[in-house]
Image: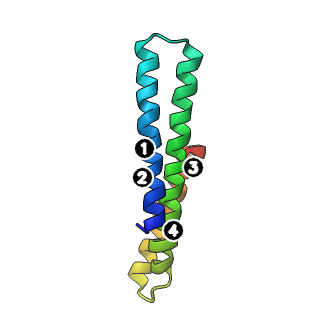
Amino acid sequence: MKKDAKSRSLQRVKIMKGQLVALEKRIEADDYCMDILTQSLAIQGSLTSLNKLVVKHHIETHISTMLGSSDEKVHDKALKELEALYDLSNVRGKYL
């Protein structure tokens, strides 16, 4: 993973760790349901951002290189990976 993508991904993970701790505390304190849901949705948003970073990096580095290959097997593998990413994004909606 490129240095910038890696540092941004790690930063997103650190944010999620803090959000998970906050969610755990809200649940233990038996906080208001909307506060718990709001915290949970914040974690989901952070995970979505991380997924987008990883997918973008994968497409920019691996798949673009594979599509430029003259080897038909490598080219076909790249197309299959793109199809898999497309299928994941359809199954999971906006979360990828």
User: Would residue 37 be seen by someone viewing this image from the given angle?
Assistant: yes
Q: How far apart are marks 1 and 2 (CA)?
A: 6 Å
Q: Which amino acid does label 3 sit on?
A: Asn
Observer-side mark, 3 or 2, equals 2
Q: Decide: marks 3, 2 in contact (CB < 8 A)?
A: no
Q: Which amino acid does label 4 sit on?
A: Ile
The quarter holding residue 77 reads: bottom left
Please report the residue visible at 43 percent of the width from the left and 84 percent of the height from the top: 72
Q: How far apart are marks 4 and 3 (CA)?
A: 17 Å
Please report the residue visible at 43 percent of the width from the left and 31 percent of the height from the top: 20
Q: What residue type is labelled 2?
A: Leu
Numbered circle sitting on residue 90: 3
| Label 2 SS | helix
Residue of label 2: 10
User: Would residue 96 be seen by someone viewing this image from the given angle?
Assistant: no
Q: Sequence order check: which comes first, mark 1 or mark 3?
A: 1
Residue of label 4: 59
